[in-house]
Amino acid sequence: MVTIKDISKKCGFSISTVSKALNGSPEIGEATKELIRETASQMGYFPNAAARLLKTNRSNNLGVLFIDEMQSGLGHEYFSAVLNSFKVEAERLGFDITFITHNIGNMPMTYYEHCKYRNCDGVLIACVDFNSPAVIELIQSEIPTVTIDHIFNDSTAILSDNLRGIKDLVHHIHDYGHRKIAFIHGENTSVTQRRLAGFHKACDTLGLTIPNNYIKQARYHDPQSSGLATRELLKLSNPPTCIIYPDDFSFIGGMNEIEKHDLKIPEDISVAGYDGIILSQVLRPRLSTYKQNTDDLGREAAGHLIDAVVNKKTYIPKQIWIEGELLVGDSIKKIEL
């Protein structure tokens, strides 16, 4: 079995330096850490988790709290991509991940209890009911946490800039000559609130008056509810010329409803999505959408969570905003004014 002493001899650093590097100590420079980790990997070194926990009081295990009410699991492409990026960066920095639930076998427990049971050094919280008492208990505990797309006072939040994203979409649609723009949004969350604020702010800036019945609520990642909302919009006496959907996947329900009305995209009705998942770019016509930067969201979440774990006494919670990009497809018709 390869030991820290063997690695020390191989790469020419002291045993103390090697140990600190493998445990992510801020005392060791990043270049040195990378060299020592690479050497350890090439030699087939595997740290003893129990010994590490005793020595450093850290397990190098990060919890992931991901509760998907729509039961799409990691088939939800946006969150799947964020979590994959988080996993890759965490592993690069020497940490494992464990999914946190309310149960272990048939034994019920709170999220906090599960984290303690698994010796989680920190927890990433994504796609949950952030108002749940069990989530709030975890946030308020001594365990460092990072949230995705939600802000708590004492936790770092990594946030996709939804305000900017929806504003960019509305301005793009307006540039194509549309003045009657409808918005189907998801359930009432902080993400929805920012998107609605961005929508109304963009419309105000452009001098657009949007009727109340152009704003419809559906659910994220739920084609059926978006289909019903689309039906209501198409039945209006003065229907919109363009509809923005909660996300690209939900647009499928809108697309089906548009086809039922014998309408064509974009000739008869223009549409736009949100997220920029692969599906949006293989549809025909190709969907105009706003692509969220899942790589940076996951990478930043891992980096800040590990920073909070390693530098627990000095780390200050932050809000990190991540911009995406507009993907111009073929689903919005240019209207000559």
Image: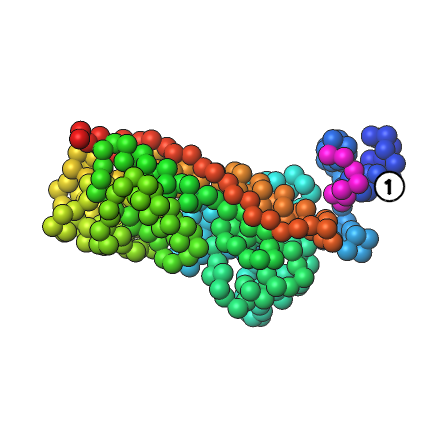
* Whether residue 163 is situated above or below residue 128 in the rendered picture: above
Quarter of the figure with residue 291 = top left
Q: Residue at x 55, y 50 (%)?
A: 157
Instruction: Judge left or right: residue 89 versus residue 255.
Output: right
Q: Position of residue 51 (x, y in %)?
A: 80, 53
Residue named by callout 1: 16
Classified by dominant secondary structure, the portion drawn in magenta counts as loop
40 or 248, which is in the foreground? 248
Quarter of the image that includes the C terminus: top left
Q: Position of residue 141 (x, y in %)?
A: 64, 64
292 or 37, which is in the foreground? 292
Instruction: Examine the rendering and report whether any part of residue 330 can be seen.
Output: yes
Q: Residue at x 13, y 42 (%)?
A: 262
101 or 274, which is in the foreground? 274
Quarter of the figure with residue 103 = bottom right
Instruction: Judge left or right: residue 289 versus residue 214.
Output: right
Q: Is residue 126 magenta?
A: no
Instruction: Judge left or right: residue 221 versus residue 333.
Output: right
Q: Residue at x 53, y 38 (%)?
A: 296
> Please, what is the three-letter code of the amino acid marked with disc 1?
Ser
- Magenta residues? 23-30
95 or 45, which is in the foreground? 95
Instruction: Judge left or right: residue 1 versus residue 276.
Output: right
